[in-house]
Image (cartoon, grey):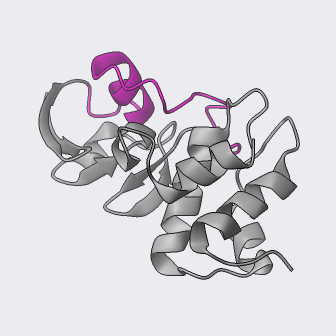
Amino acid sequence: MSIRVRVNGVEKELEVDPEMPLLWALRDVLGLTGTKFGCGQALCGACTVHLDGQVVRACVTPVSRAAGRAVTTIEGLSPDGSHPLQKAWVDLGVPQCGFCQAGQIMTAAALLAKKPKPTDADIDQSLAGNLCRCGTYNRIRAAVKKAAGVSEE
């Protein structure tokens, strides 16, 4: 079946099973490997992308749900790494293993789009579903605040 979807601003025609998880369409069909497979059950957040600006877990989202819609992956957030969140992540040395970071950044980007000056509670609540096995939660929060121009208390 043919499914049209706009991925990172570019129209794509995908010849895939409509029930294929969006994650595999992105990674295996389109070669966008920044979105990671973590748990396959929407529990860890490593596969987080935006669907029409809303956070979704690509591992459990059928590609058919993206038909006619806009998908943004970490590669589309800023191809050159100049997004304020990406810069803050680097400046503060947030990643250790880095595996969860694309999902963390995509979730944080959706938060900042809705709430440009988030509080610690806003950040913690928004990112609660994104797991970091390395435990860099304090640096993640600090990077979100830096990207938002919110000072550390």
Q: Position of residue 140 (x, y in %)?
A: 75, 54
Q: Can the viewer see residue 58 in this picture?
A: yes
Q: Position of residue 114 (x, y in %)?
A: 48, 78
Q: Quadrant of residue 74?
A: top left
Residue, x 79% and y 31% (percent of image)? 96
Q: Quadrant of the N terminus?
A: top left
Residue, x 87% and y 80% (percent of image)? 153
Along the viewing direction, whichever of 63 and 123 lies nearer the viewer = 123
Q: Position of residue 139 (x, y in %)?
A: 81, 53
Q: Can the viewer see residue 45 in this picture?
A: no
148 is higher (above) or lower (below) than 17 = below
Horizontal placement of 123 versus 113: left or right? right
143 is higher (above) or lower (below) than 14 = below
Along the viewing direction, whichever of 86 and 77 lies nearer the viewer = 86
Horizontal placement of 56 versus 67: left or right? right
Residue range in magenta is 17-45
Q: Position of residue 130 (x, y in %)?
A: 70, 50
